[in-house]
Image: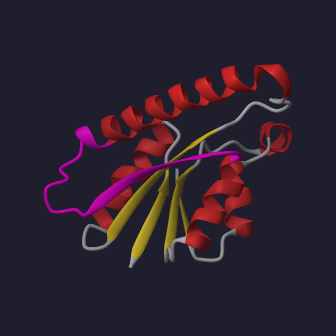
Amino acid sequence: MAVLVAYDGSAPAQKAVEYAFSTHADEEIILLRVVEAADGSTGAGIGLVQEALRERQEEASTELEDATEVIDTDDVEFRTETAVGKPEREVVEFAEEHDVDHVIIGSHGREGVSRVLLGSVAEKIVRRAPVPVTVVR
């Protein structure tokens, strides 16, 4: 069984990692960091955009390593992955393409108007994911 944890560097995402490691320690855990690509990145500046994405992916890998430093990982099988795109789309696609059985995500817990105005990545993942999703607040 594989468990996918969406990680964005935030405190709620860190709580999701900790939850996954404590409740799914006997399963494979995949930490996925999605790097968002800038819209309208075409034309002569594409080389600069690609270089910026490479740098951002390296930073994302470092963030994933940092996320696991504060957790006892000795008995837990996990790996880190990065993807480029919109977080809600990439998490769902990764789950579909890699036989993930469960997704765990952190939520900022926004309610009311702020949730409507800002949108909710967690909500979009819950609605679109092909597998059960646990939202950690």
Q: Work out whether 133 lies above or below 9.
A: below
Identify the residue at image location x=57%, y=68%: 95
Q: Quadrant of residue 27?
A: bottom left
Identify the residue at image location x=22%, y=62%: 76
**Residue that extends furthest to the left in the rendered view of this protein:** 74
Q: Quadrant of residue 97?
A: bottom right
Q: Position of residue 83 (x, y in %)?
A: 57, 48
* Magenta stretch encompasses residue 57: no
Q: Position of residue 56 (x, y in %)?
A: 54, 29
107 on left or right of 28: right
Q: Position of residue 123 (x, y in %)?
A: 71, 57
75 on left or right of 132: left
Q: Work out whether 32 lies above or below 128.
A: above
Q: Quadrant of the N terminus?
A: bottom left
How is the protein colored in the picture? secondary structure
* Magenta stretch encompasses residue 69: yes
Q: Position of residue 15 (x, y in %)?
A: 41, 47
Q: Give the total of numbered labels.
A: 0
Identify the residue at image location x=83%, y=30%: 42
Identify the residue at image location x=25%, y=64%: 77
Q: As rendered, which of 27 and 137 lies closer to the eye?
A: 27
126 on left or right of 54: right
Span of residues in magenta: 68-86
